[in-house]
Image (cartoon, grey):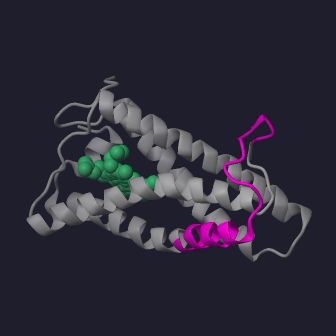
Amino acid sequence: MKLYNDTNAFGLVSRANHWISAFLFIGLIALGIYMHELPKSPEKFELYDLHKSLGIGLFVLMMLRLVWLKISPNPEQISHNRFEHILAHSVKGILYLAMIMMPISGWIMSNSGGHEVAFFNLFTLPNLVGENETVHEIAEGIHGTMGPLMILVIALHIAGALKHHLIYKDNTLKRMLGKK
Ligand code: HEM
């Protein structure tokens, strides 16, 4: 089983990172929307802690992904026309950006709102900012707007993967699943 990517295939490291991040990302958005709607209760705050811990997990995976990209670059994207090439690249770029900006804005939102960010009661992250209402509102605006927006971006990304698989019948989805 190949760990590294090559010009035509994703290795195990990139595939594992992609699918774990994908489940985490979709789960975090769903959990974020659900917990936001709950009335104040101990359950709500437990879910906030879970959301923060999983968010840290996604952020760490994203940092590892950036390191791995340097060590083992992704294969060339399979493209059938220029428009779809640019669209697919842009969508992936937005997802990369979101996997950096959403955890950081959530971290700043918590700290500026007077809360700490801990990873499953194992350790607490340092505070990025002190308590500050204006900063809190800005971070909340970014975090709260990006979540629902990402649903659209992910839908576009999945639609692209399915189009490659079902209409172009190429290797795009298969190689991300590790199939020949
Ligand atoms: C069922 C859901 C998903 C499917 C079917 C899917 C499918 C794929 C496929 C087939 C590729 C390879 C594209 C290529 O060869 O250029 C890919 C790449 C990628 N996907 Fe997804 N994806 C899903 C969910 C997600 C989610 C939720 C995210 C965001 C966190 C995401 C982020 C990325 C990124 C950043 C890449 C670029 C390659 C990399 O750096 O890993 N995907 N996806």
Q: Does the magenta-highlighted stretch encompass residue 46? A: no
Q: Does the magenta-highlighted stretch encompass residue 139? A: yes
Q: Quadrant of the C terminus?
A: top left
Q: Which residue is drawn at 77% across and 60% down?
A: 131
Q: Which residue is drawn at 75% across and 55% down?
A: 130
Above-or-below relation of 8 to 19: above
Q: Is residue 28 left or right of residue 122?
A: left
Spot occupied by residue 119 in the image (x, y as percentages of width and height): 72, 41
Q: In this view, does 139 lie to the left or right of 15?
A: right
Instruction: Write down the region rendered in magenta.
Output: 119-145
Above-or-below relation of 23 to 146: above
Marker count (numbered)? 0
For residue 81, what is the image quadrant?
bottom left
Q: Which residue is drawn at 80% across and 56% down?
A: 115
Spot occupied by residue 40 in the image (x, y as percentages of width and height): 87, 72
The front one of 34 and 48 is 48
Spot occupied by residue 11 in the image (x, y as percentages of width and height): 32, 31
Q: Residue at x 46, y 68 (%)?
A: 150
Q: Is residue 38 visible?
A: yes
For residue 30, what is the image quadrant?
bottom right
Q: Is residue 135 left or right of residue 13?
A: right
Spot occupied by residue 48 in the image (x, y as percentages of width and height): 76, 59
> In the current view of this chain or complex, which residue is farthest to the left?
81
Q: Is residue 166 visible?
A: no
The front one of 148 and 101 is 101
Q: Quadrant of the N terminus?
A: top left
Q: Is residue 161 left or right of residue 103?
A: left
The front one of 154 and 165 is 154
